[in-house]
Amino acid sequence: MTSNLPAVRQPDGHLNAMVTWQHRRGGQAHCLVRLYPSDGRVVAVASEISSNDDRYGIADDMSGVAAKALHLVQEQFNADPHSITWLTHHGAFSYYDAFDPDTFTLIPLSWDGRCFQDNLEAHRLLTEGEVRGLLGGRNLEPVPRVLANLGWPF
């Protein structure tokens, strides 16, 4: 499944988009990416969705997600790769048999001037309060609603 869907700017200034990329394991992958600008920085929230093949999960290739989403960040917010905070988001919408509460993981990617590098040992779970703080007090809209607004089947 590939996406030709446009990114959609929201009234509060953030951007919702589906991102597709060639996963490092070789398959085609996709996820929801939401970009939140604040004070010259951008917080990028990548949400794993159940329509993405389990073999090609976002946590296993965040540098691939970031590489594909970078053009949106630069085009829409003129942000430097060093000024992006990357988060993964998992919940009941991530897997067909999932019922767990939402989880958020800070993914501190480094930028070498050409590509992002991921250090799995540096990943850190965040509370919803920490995420809300990073988003400037905003709450994330439910993933199914965002996907429906983007015209993505869920």
Image: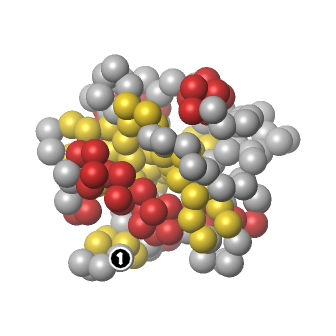
Vertical arrangement, residue 39 with respect to residue 125, above or below: above
Image quadrant in which the C terminus is located: top right
Vertical arrangement, residue 84 with respect to residue 33, above or below: below
Crowd class of label 1 (few under 14; some 14 to 19; many from 20; radius 10 Å): some
Left or right: 148 as drawn, with respect to 95 = left
Colour style of the rendered protein structure: secondary structure
In the rendered image, residue 148, in percent from the top left (x then y), is placed at 64, 27
Vertical arrangement, residue 54 with respect to residue 60, above or below: above
Image point 67% across, 45% down: which residue? Answer: 49
Residue 101 visible in the shown view: yes
Kindly identify the amino acid type of the residue bearing the numbered disc 1: Cys
Seen from the viewer's position, the closer of residues 100 and 19 is 19
Q: Quadrant of residue 27?
A: bottom right
Left or right: 57 as drawn, with respect to 85 = right
Image point 50% across, 61% down: which residue? Answer: 65
Q: Quadrant of residue 74?
A: bottom left
In the rendered image, residue 132, in percent from the top left (x then y), is placed at 37, 29
Residue labelled with disc 1: 115
Looking at the image, which residue sits at the far top? 11
Vertical arrangement, residue 99 with respect to residue 57, above or below: above
Residue 125 visible in the shown view: no
Left or right: 101 as drawn, with respect to 125 = right
Looking at the image, which residue sits at the far right? 97
In the rendered image, residue 26, in percent from the top left (x then y), is placed at 68, 78
Which element is circle 1 on? loop
